Image (spheres, helix red, strand yellow):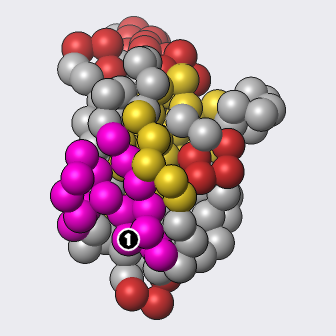
Amino acid sequence: MWLRDLLFSAAVSVLIITFLYQPVRVEGTSMLPRLEDHDRLFINKFVYQIESIQRGDVVVFHYPRDPEKSYIKRVIAVSGDRLRIDRGRVWLNGEPLREDYVPDTFRDTRSMAEMLVPEDTYFMMGDHRSISSDSREFGPVDRSLIYGKAVFVYWPAHDAGVVR
């Protein structure tokens, strides 16, 4: 009886990890202050099959210049958005973007000319702007490279919680 329950539990766990959630480890500090180097979190691999990617989502994607590597960044702009950056201040569709998740000490002064985010792409930025390698360098990320939404930090325990 217990062997059947154990096998059932293992099968359900494999299905959940394969199709719904995947544990990942953060490498780097570009998403400080919420995500720290070596934090472990779950990403939802299924959510974007039933809903669209939204501005503000923290997503995991294959790095466009080397698909063997994965990056975790925040979606700043979606397809069709007009985006520009003026001395570190992000403007989206003519309005300044409110970014409470970026502490003043993590901002930078880089600028970028206005662009229209192409169809089926997303503009990504790290929350620690002064050290982040993001769409300001490698351009908008194609939808096909995005494979999960960061949902929950589970380790270390003192950082456990929902990713916002």
- Taking 150 as reference, is 85 above or below it? below
- Count numbered badges in the picture: 1
Find residue 37 and report its image quarter: bottom right
Given residues 64 and 35, the one toward you in this image is 64
- Taking 53 as reference, is 157 above or below it? below
Give how far across and how far down residue 141 sits, in percent: 55, 32
Q: Residue at x 59, y 52 (%)?
A: 136
Q: Which residues are magenta?
A: 82-98
Given residues 116 and 129, the one toward you in this image is 116
Give how far across and how far down residue 60 sits, in percent: 51, 39
Circle 1 is placed at which residue position?
A: 89
| Left or right of residue 159: residue 96 | left
* Location of the N terminus (image quadrant): top left
- Taking 75 as reference, is 53 above or below it? above
Give how far across and how far down residue 113 sits, in percent: 50, 53
Specify whether residue 89 is painted magenta. yes
- Mark 1: which secondary structure? strand
Given residues 164 and 16, the one toward you in this image is 164
Q: Would you say the magenta stretch is mainly helix, strand or loop?
A: strand
Q: Residue at x 56, y 71 (%)?
A: 110
